[in-house]
Every structure is written in C-alpha cells, then in structure tokens.
Image (cartoon, rainbow, N blue to C red):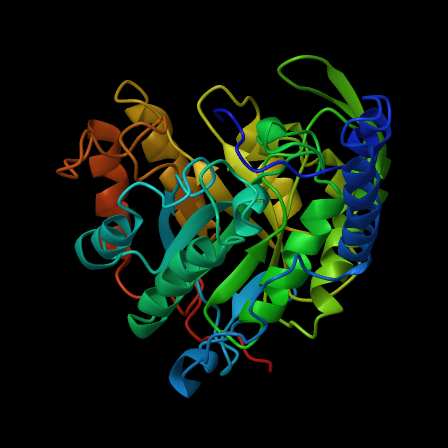
Amino acid sequence: MSNVTRRRYSRVAFVSSLKTGARGSLWAVVAGLAAIVYWSLLAAGAGPAPMERASPACPPTIAAMRLHVQGTQLVNSAGKVVVLRGVNIPSLEWANTGDHVAELLQTAIHVWKCTLVRIELSQTRWFGLADGQKDHGKAYRKIVDGLVEAAGHDRVYVILNLQWSDLDRSPADAGQHRLPDARSAAFWRSVATRYRSWGNVWFDLYSETHGVNWETWLHGGLTTAETRHTVVTYRAWGMQQLYDAVRHQGAANIVVVPVLGWGADLVGLINGYRVKGYNILYDAHIYPDVTAWKQQLAAVAAEVPLMVGEWGGGDKDLAFGRQFLKFLDAHAMTWTAWSLHPDALPSLIRNWQYEPTVFGALVKMAIIDGGKPVTTMPGRSNPVGGG
C-alpha cells in the first residue's frame, strides 16, 4: 500500500481530531460523529454508501449450476459426486484493477481447462477505500462481476476469497492478518447479497487464519496484528460469525472455511471445532514444507468435507507434486493450485506469455487430464445417490 489519498475517520481518529485545537474543530466533530454512525451501521449490516444495491442478473443456466455438500462430498443436483480442479488467480487483493485478471481467467478456462478458479479479493478495495479509488469501489465490484459472469458462461465455478482485511482501520493496514474483523463481516454481507443467486459462486471466508486458538478461530475475540508502525489489538470475527453473516443474507452458496496454521493445521476439526451450518467445505493449504500432511488430510477427509484451496511448489518440488496429486485423486478431492500469476510465488507460470513453469506444467497436465468435473468416486461403479 502507498499513501492513502482518501481519509476515513475511525472512532480513534475522531478522538484524536478533538486534540488538534480550535482550527477545524467543528469539522472534526461533524466528521467524527458521521464516522461513528457510518461504521456502526456497517458493523450492524449496512453497506458503505453510496453502493448500488441491485445484484447482477444471473442467467437461469448459471443459477442451475449450484452444487451441494452431502456428507463429506460435493454433489450436483442429481446427487452425483463432483470433483473440481483449477488454479488461484491473485492480484485483486493488492491492485484496484488486478493484473490481467480477465486474460488470466480465459487462460485458466480455455488453455488450462480449469473447472474451478479461486479469486483473491480485498475488503478495502471492495468498499472503495484504497488509494486511487474515487468511486466507492464500484469499478472494482464490476471487475468481479465480469469474472463471475464470464466463468459462469463457460460452466466454471468461482471461489471468491477474502484474502486481505484491514483491521477495520486505515487502508494502510490492509493485508493478511490472523483473523478477519468487523469490516470483513460487512464485506460478506455485501458479497453474499450480490451473488446469492449465482450457482457457480462459492464464498471463501478468509485466507490462512493463524496465530490464535481454535476457540477464537470459531467464535472470535481480541487478538493482535503487527502494522507498519505498531502492534494493534483488535476484535476479530470468528468463522461462525462470518458464516452467519453470509446465511443471514439468504445465500445458500457453498461456504469455504479456512483452517488454522496458515491452512495446514486441521487438528481442531477432529476435536469438534466446526462451524454449524450446511454447504460447508473446509479448506487446507499444503506446500512442500508442511509435514505429515498425508496423515492429517486423510484423517480429516474421512470425517468432514474438505478441499485444498492452495498447494504448489517450485521446479525442484516435482516429487512432492506428483505424490500430492496422487493423494488428491485417490481421495477425489477438489483443489485449486497456487498461482496463475508470475509474481505470486510459488507461481505456475513464468511470464505474461503464460509459459508454465516445470511445476506448472505438472499441474496443468493434471487439470487437463481431469477434463470435465469428475462425477464418480474412484473405485465406484455407480454415482453417489441422494438429493
């Protein structure tokens, strides 16, 4: 983040502004009171104003793509098990317009043959609070609309992932933190309302929660974050609270819930720390430095619905990659590899000509070999029944 050109007053900034003396004191009082009302409404469920309220119209064919979680499996409307494979498309978390995101999506769909893409977002930019945004986030949201619609027309599913939060403070504090905050809940109310009719859209509550215990992960509480200048204590929102924020908007979309340890600690799920609700997939992130991943994933996948939202490696990690792909196939697990961006490491492509890395070529071949979504479990002669 660079210099922030759009200032917003928090409660702390309001109190500080009263200490600046007579000059501008009236403006400080008015702005501060307005900010208190504004952010109180935001935390209560109102979106930042002005914001267009109409959701993009969803074509019936895309609405009909909706999947469901049944037991530990992902199923379609016919009750058949579905397995999706794809990639992450980052950059909308750090850039107002992203980096070639429309081209990357087309490459993922038509060249890599992905059936699922995970798109990283920023709550700061969604609400138009970042440096350079002067339209309250309208252009940013339209970019996301375009990606969702384009993917849907090609029968591809989209995970909208909240990658960057901002501690409900200054946009300069935007980044990955231990847990989300009050503005994250407002983000999900807005996103859920906007895409609740889109059958190809899933909601990934937060990326790589870490540094807290499982109780706080689930229900929220006070935690800390290191900013550029200090250590901040803030009230974090738990996964149950964010899930509820989505469902209260009438959205039945699949909700992806991250686990602790930057996505590598799944022990709490075995010990009963789970979000109460339906259509939930838990999300693991596995890289070559994660130890005992096979035992953890196998144990958890036997009890709870699980996907792998991030995994990847460098060109020297092919042995890991082959072993991990074999595991994923054996357990019919949905996944998205990291990342289809040359600068977001470990990258699957070398450059903006989209030339795969050695590891990327391995992933690309695995996706292409998978072809259309798998609709039967390996080793099963019949699709899974149910409704």
User: Can you name the residue that lies furthest to the bottom here?
Assistant: 60
Residue 301 versus residue 132 in the image, above or below: below
Residue 7 versus residue 102 in the image, above or below: above
Look at 70% across and 54% down and name the residue there.
186
User: Can you name the residue that lies furthest to the top here?
Assistant: 229
- Front residue of 165/61: it is 165
Q: Does residue 305 show up?
A: yes
* Count of residue discs: 0
- Front residue of 155/104: it is 104
Is residue 113 toward the left or the right of residue 198 in the image? left
**Residue 197 percent location from the top left of the image:** 54, 77
Look at 50% across and 75% down and name the residue there.
66
Look at 77% across and 39% down and name the residue there.
27
**Residue 22 percent location from the top left of the image:** 84, 26
Is residue 66 toward the left or the right of residue 149 in the image? right
- Front residue of 93/345: it is 93
**Residue 8 percent location from the top left of the image:** 67, 39
**Residue 204 percent location from the top left of the image:** 58, 51
Residue 375 versus residue 98 in the image, above or below: below
Q: Does residue 272 show up?
A: no
Residue 157 versus residue 16 in the image, above or below: below
Rendered-image quadrant of the C terminus? bottom right
